[in-house]
Image (cartoon, rainbow, N blue to C red):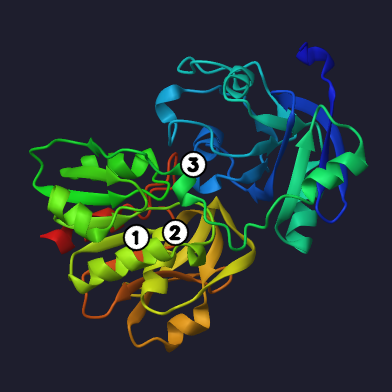
Amino acid sequence: MNYFTKLPAILLLADGTVFYGKAAGKMGTTTGEICFNTGMTGYQEIFTDPSYFGQIMVTTNAHIGNYGIANEEVESGRIQIAGLVCKNYNIAYSRKQADESIQDYFQEQNIVGISDIDTRQLVRHIRDKGAMNAIISSEILDLDELKAKLDLVPSMDGLELSSQVTTTETYTFGSEDAPYRVAVLDLGVKKNILRNFDSRDVYAKVFPAKTTYAEMEKDFAPTGYFISNGPGDPAAMPYAVETVKEILAADKPMFGICLGHQLLALANDIPTQKMFNGHRGLNHPVKNIIINHCEVTSQNHGFGVVPEAVRASDKVEITHVNLNDQSIEGIRVKGKKAFSVQYHPESSPGPHDSRYLFDDFIKLMK
C-alpha cells in the first residue's frame, strides 16, 4: 500500500457512532472493547502490555509512530492490543535507536488500525458513554455488515482472558544466585516488572496462570509470591482466586499489581466491578495514606474493587486512594505479609514515583 494515498477505513462503535478515516497497519477487520490512554509517550509499551489484550486502543497523543519501534523496549513477546485508533499515523520515524517503523511492526504482527480521525471527539464520546465494543475495518465498508460482526463480540464483563496471554511454559529471570526467589503467577506479566525484580537481587520464576500454589511451592520453594497484572474480568478467574487464598493461608509474602490487586481483594471476600471507563494514563494522582504522601502513577485497568466493600472489610486495610475519584488503589491484608496496588509501579517509560513498592516487598521477604 502507498501510504501517501491511504485507503479508507471505518470505525463503528456499539452504540452506532461511526468514524471515517484511513487504513493503518494491516488491511483487515478487528474487534474489541474500545478504550483510550492519555499518555504522551510510551506507545509501544502500551501496544505490548498484555493487560490490553482484547482492547482497541485510542491514543490521545496526536502523533503515533514518530519515534519508531525499539525491540528492547517491548513489555511482552508480541503486540497485545486488538487494534489501534490514532490521529496521525507516522510511518517515518526519527530515533537512532529504533529498529523499524510502526507500519512494518503492525504488518508483521497482523494488527489493524485506523488513523486520520478526530480522536478528541472520539475520546469525549467514550468518556460520556462509557467503554463499549467497537469494530475497525479497512476491507469492509458496509455498515450493516460491520454491525452484524460487531454484534457477535462478547462483552469484557465476565470475560476470562489471562489464560490466553500467560506463558505456556515456566521460565526464569535474573541470577540464580540472588538472595530472594520470587514465584511470579503470570496472568499477563510485563517485562519491566521482571526487570525491577532483577535489579533488586531477585531470582524470579514465571509460572503459567493456572499453576497451583502447591506446584509453585514444590517446584521453586520461593521466598515470596507475585501476582501479576493481566486482562479481563477478575471475577471470572476462580482458579487464580483460589491460588491467592492458598498463598495467604500459608502466610507467605505476597505482592499483587493491577489484576493481582483485584484478585487479592476477591480472596478476602471483597467484590470487583466493571468501571464506566477505567483508568489508563501516566498522570493519575494517588495518595499513600500510610505515609501521607502523593505519587503520580501509571494506570491501566477497566475493573476495580468495590470501594464500599473495602471500607467495610475487617480483613484488609486501605493503603492508597485515587485522588481523582477516591477509588481504592492499594490494600494490605491484616495479620499477613500481603499487599497490592491497582496501578503500575514498574511503569515504563514512567513515572517512577512508586518504585518503592518493590523495595517494600523485599523487606517483607527479609
Task: Please determine whether, in this image, residue 113 is positioned above or below residue 356.
Answer: above
Mark 2–mark 1 CB contact (< 8 Å): yes
User: Which quadrant of the figure contains the N terminus?
Assistant: top right
* Residue at 43% from the left image edge and 41% from the top image edge: 348
Tell me which amino acid carries mark 3. Asp
Q: Which mark is residue 344?
A: none
Q: Secondary structure at mark 2?
A: helix
Expressed as whole percent of the image width and height from the top left, the position of residue 339 reads: 30, 67
Query: Residue 74 is drawn in which quadrant?
Result: top left
Q: How many marks?
A: 3
Expressed as whole percent of the image width and height from the top left, the position of residue 304 reads: 52, 67
Residue position marked by numbered label 3 in the rendering: 49
* Residue at 92% from the left image edge and 36% from the top image edge: 142
Q: Is residue 172 visible?
A: yes
* Label whose residue precedes the other's in the sequence (1 or 3): 3
Marks 3 and 2 sit apart, C-alpha to C-alpha, by 13 Å
* Label whose residue precedes the other's in the sequence (3 or 2): 3
Mark 1–mark 3 CB contact (< 8 Å): no
Q: Residues within 10 Å of mark 3 (few under 14, many from 20)?
A: many
Q: Is residue 258 visible?
A: no
Marks 2 and 1 sit apart, C-alpha to C-alpha, by 7 Å
Position of 200 with respect to 98 (left or right) is left
Residue position marked by numbered label 1 in the rendering: 256
Residue position marked by numbered label 2 in the rendering: 259
Task: Please determine whether, in this image, residue 338 is positioned above or below residue 283.
Answer: below
Tell me which amino acid carries mark 2. Leu
User: Which quadrant of the figure contains the C terminus?
Assistant: bottom left
Mark 3–mark 2 CB contact (< 8 Å): no
Towards the viewer: 88 or 275: 275
